[in-house]
Image (tube, grey):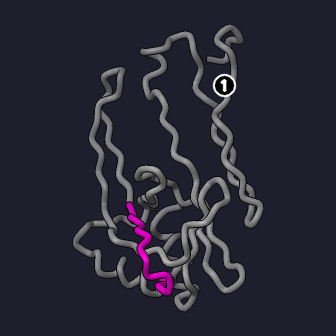
Amino acid sequence: MNIQTFLTHLHQHPDLPLGLVLPDGSLVPAHFHITELGHVTKRFIDCGGTRRHSETCLLQTWVHEDTEHRLHAGKLAEIFKRSGDLALSETLPVEIEHELESATHFTVEQASVRDGVLWFQLGVKQTDCLARGVCLPNTCAPAPFAAPAPFPAWTPTPKAASRCTPQSGCC
């Protein structure tokens, strides 16, 4: 989900508390805080020698002992409004950083309102080889990941499966 779509959901439901659903269906505790809103630029070279870059809007969560705390959509929209000098393009994807056993980044897949809460479904981020033709010339690209099931039947996204085999002639 990009910033524009994310903000649309926040503006449509400013008085609703926010909820985050992890890819396995468990919930981020309702009293989470957003401690950072960042414009993250990653410049890198892939294993095949191609220079690349990616940009995201990263929201960092933090869960503290103040169990009565609730972040409402309007408050998060205000935080975005104050981020003007971070040069956040509305087309940037929104990601959530949440600490499980370590800090983990999640994609934001979809939003829905249920039981008076604006829920954001989080998805998994996967690693992949961006230079398969150079590094693994006899392999095919992985199949695209399946979209998450509609709310509330959240299930983890399955691991990528090969779209074809090297001998099939599709690569």
- Residue at 68% x, 8% y is 167
The residue beneath circle 1 is 162
**Which region of the structure is painted magenta?**
58-71
Point 36% across, 20% down: residue: 48
On screen, 82 above or below 51? below
Asked if 66 appears above or below 168 in the picture, the reply is below
Q: Is residue 100 above or below residue 171?
A: below
Q: Closest to the observer: 99 or 22? A: 99
Q: Position of residue 56 (x, y in %)?
A: 38, 56
Residue closest to the far front = 65
Q: Is residue 164 magenta?
A: no
Horizontal relation, residue 134 to residue 163: left or right: left
Q: Residue at x 29, y 51 (%)?
A: 41
Q: What residue do we see at 59% from left, 68% from top?
A: 120
How many residues crowd around disc 1 within 10 Å: few (fewer than 14), some, or many (20 or more)?
few
In the rendered image of this protein, does residue 149 appear above or below residue 48? below
Q: Residue furthest right?
A: 153
Q: Position of residue 89 (x, y in %)?
A: 36, 64
Taking the magenta stretch, the answer to whether it contains residue 60 is yes
Picture quarter containing residue 29? bottom right
Judged from the image, the secondary structure of the residue bearing numbered disc 1 is loop
Q: Position of residue 98 (x, y in %)?
A: 45, 59
Q: Quadrant of the C terminus?
A: top right
Q: Is residue 34 left or right of residue 127?
A: left
Q: Position of residue 2 (x, y in %)?
A: 48, 62
Q: Amino acid at mark 1?
A: Ser
